[in-house]
């Protein structure tokens, strides 16, 4: 079984990869609109696309982080300090 903190990183990397793909899809959509829309409409569309990215990606990251943090605490027997120490150790803090 994978280390709990490593699994958290893998899940966050998966979420980030999905967000990059969604970002590319929105970019292609907005860039494709350049050819058949007036400039003002295109700029409005680009602003809306960026707002969608910000809202959705912020929600997804927060959801995954909260869920994975609670999962990590549960795997450490409910000890939040131990889970936090494990997370810090896994990302390299505390090593000489």
Image (cartoon, rainbow, N blue to C red):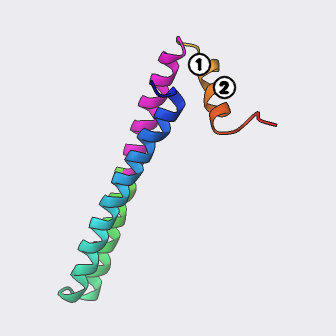
Q: From the viewer's perspective, is 53 left or right of 83?
A: left
Q: Which residue is more in the foreground, 29 or 76?
A: 76
Q: From the viewer's perspective, is 55 left or right of 75?
A: left
Nearer the observer, disc 1 or disc 2? 2
Q: Residue at x 21, y 88 (%)?
A: 35
Q: Residue at x 34, y 63 (%)?
A: 23
Residue lying farthest top?
77
Residue that label 2 marks:
85
Q: Badges 1 and 2: C-beta atoms under 8 Å apart? A: no
Q: Is residue 68 above or below residue 33?
A: above
Residue lying farthest front?
1
Q: Quadrant of the C terminus?
A: top right
Q: Residue at x 28, y 79 (%)?
A: 31
**SS state under label 1:** helix
Q: Which mark is residue 80?
A: 1
Locate residue 45, reporting x and y percent: 27, 73
Q: Which residues fall within the magenta stretch?
A: 57-77
Locate residue 27, reporting x and y percent: 31, 71
Locate residue 69, reporting x and y percent: 49, 28
> Mark 1 to mark 2: distance in Å?
9 Å
**SS state under label 2:** helix
- For label 1, the crowd category at 10 Å Cα-Cα, with few meaning under 14, some 14 to 19 and many 20 or more, is some
Work out whether mark 1 precedes mark 2 in sequence or the reverse, and give the earlier one: 1
Q: Residue at x 39, y 37 (%)?
A: 63
Q: Is residue 6 above or below residue 30?
A: above
Q: Is residue 55 visible?
A: no
Q: Which mark is residue 39?
A: none
């Amino acid at each position: 079984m994978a280390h709990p903190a490593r699994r958290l990183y893998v899940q966050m990397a998966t979420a980030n990869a999905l967000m990059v793909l969604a970002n590319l899809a929105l970019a292609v959509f907005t860039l494709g609109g350049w050819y058949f829309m007036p400039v003002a409409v295109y700029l409005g569309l680009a602003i809306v696309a960026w707002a969608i990215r910000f809202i959705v990606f912020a929600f997804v990251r927060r959801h995954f982080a909260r869920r994975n943090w609670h999962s990590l605490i549960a795997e450490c027997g409910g000890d939040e300090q131990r889970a936090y120490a494990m997370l810090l150790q896994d990302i390299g803090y505390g090593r000489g």
